[in-house]
Image: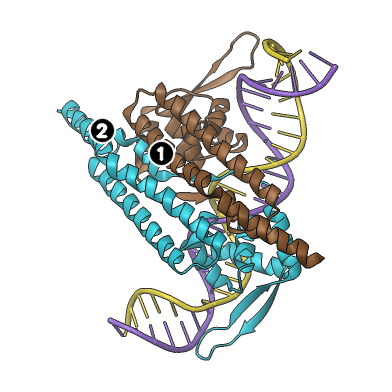
Chain colours: A brown, B cyan, C yellow, D purple
DNA sequence: GCTCACATGTAATAAGTTACATGATTTC
DNA sequence: GAAATCATGTAACTTATTACATGTGAGC
């Protein structure tokens, strides 16, 4: 259902292909909604076509594989607006990083620091990606959504930057304790 | 795998039951990591027991159903620390709310406003729940994680409060346009 | 008398992931 | 010559959800 909404969400804004959909689900704004693989996208597009919510045409560019370009229909547009108004509504946040933070005392200091670095970089990259998208964005609702993401992630990043030393101390302290206990 | 890490994450901090695990996965800090149902928790606990990572004892309180209380073993503790250091590490955020924001123009103004209210309330409730947990929290790593969650959600809430009118205008404007087009 | 909280568990079903299969072109 | 990008798709597998099954006690 997530994949379906995601596909329709992209398609109401314009034509696209399965290959592009997967990229969109990993790179930009749509990362907020899904992280879909080929194995879910292609069957989904076929199903949408069977239901008459999208149409498909094949495009041949010389020297490239055939692309199947999907276009949403009026029926598809109506169905999407309907489905948007159906539950579920609750946002979910799954954070392997915060799971690590929670158990910082049991992790090797080096591993923890590397993970914190990686998380900071991940946030910086995503903030930058969304900022770039924002700078060329003309649709007001898309801009709003991008700004929301940027500000939230900026807050998350700032918290880590300001407080990481505390977490790293915990890891070092209990790491030393383990070494001493072993002696 | 999410459910497994979640169960072990709770169990390293202390004994618990399947019933409690489900509540924890919905209410407090652990909402960040999973939202597990009985159908995933009970089979997971049985598997952990078979693997020797937890032990189980039955507790009978007069007038109440039998509770199966699970305790992590040394082997379980070691396995958890190992598994924590395995991928995946990427945080994922799934936001049906931002999906609505993105398509604000196509939604009825009343529905949108109700959803924004609901999202604000959801954030306020979660911030309050985490703040309460923080006020009685003694473990430094747990405090860190709670504060991280509180600050990030506070930023998300503030953004919505400051910018919701913009989104609501978009919805009203296109709603009026649809009415005029119909006339 | 009804509903909620406590408490465990299974079976059918839905959904998505991973790995595989295929193949051309471009870049290093 | 290797790797990356473009491009579509399937099959086996894993995982989790939903609904069901069962039963007690407390509060309204």
Q: Which quarter of the picture shows residue A13?
A: top left
User: Is residue C4 placed above or below B88 in the rendered structure?
Assistant: below
- Kindly report which numbered mark, 2 or 1, lies closer to the viewer in this rendering: 1
Q: Nearer the viewer, residue B33 or A22?
A: B33
Q: Are marks 2 and 1 in contact (CB under 8 Å)?
A: no
Image mark for residue B170:
2
Q: Which residue is mark 1?
A: A151
Q: Quarter holding the C terminus of chain A?
A: bottom right
Same chain under badges 2 and 1? The reply is: no
Image position, residue A62 (x, y; %): 62, 8
Q: Chain of mark 1?
A: A
* C22 over A95 or under it: above or below: above
Q: Is the residue marked by circle 2 packed among few (<14), some (14-19), or many (20+) residues within 10 Å? A: some
| Subunit of label 2 | B
**Looking at this view, is C21 or B143 the one in front?**
B143
Determine the CA span between mark 2 and mark 1. 21 Å
For label 1, the crowd category at 10 Å Cα-Cα, with few meaning under 14, some 14 to 19 and many 20 or more, is some
Is the residue A63 above or below the residue B172 in the image? above
**Residue A88 in view in this figure:** no
Q: Locate residue B42, reporting x and y percent.
A: 61, 68
- The local secondary structure at tag 2 comes to helix
Residue at point 64% right, 46% down? A113
Q: Quadrant of residue B132?
A: bottom left
């Amino acid at each position: 259902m997530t994949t379906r909404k995601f596909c329709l969400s992209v398609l109401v804004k314009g034509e696209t292909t399965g290959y592009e959909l997967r990229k969109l689900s990993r790179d930009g704004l749509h990362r907020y909604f899904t992280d879909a693989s080929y194995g879910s996208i292609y069957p989904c597009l076929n199903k949408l076509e069977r239901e008459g919510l999208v149409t498909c045409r094949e495009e041949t560019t010389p020297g490239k594989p055939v692309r199947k370009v999907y276009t949403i229909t009026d029926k598809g547009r109506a169905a999407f607006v309907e489905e948007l108004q159906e539950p579920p509504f609750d946002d979910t946040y799954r954070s392997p990083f915060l799971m690590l933070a929670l158990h910082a005392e049991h992790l090797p200091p080096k591993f923890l620091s590397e993970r914190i670095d990686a998380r900071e970089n991940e946030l910086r990259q995503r903030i930058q990606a969304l900022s770039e998208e924002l700078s060329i964005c003309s649709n007001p609702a898309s801009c709003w959504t991008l700004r929301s993401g940027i500000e939230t992630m900026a807050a998350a990043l700032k918290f880590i930057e300001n407080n990481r030393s505390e977490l790293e101390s915990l890891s070092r302290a209990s790491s030393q304790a383990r070494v001493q206990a072993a002696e």
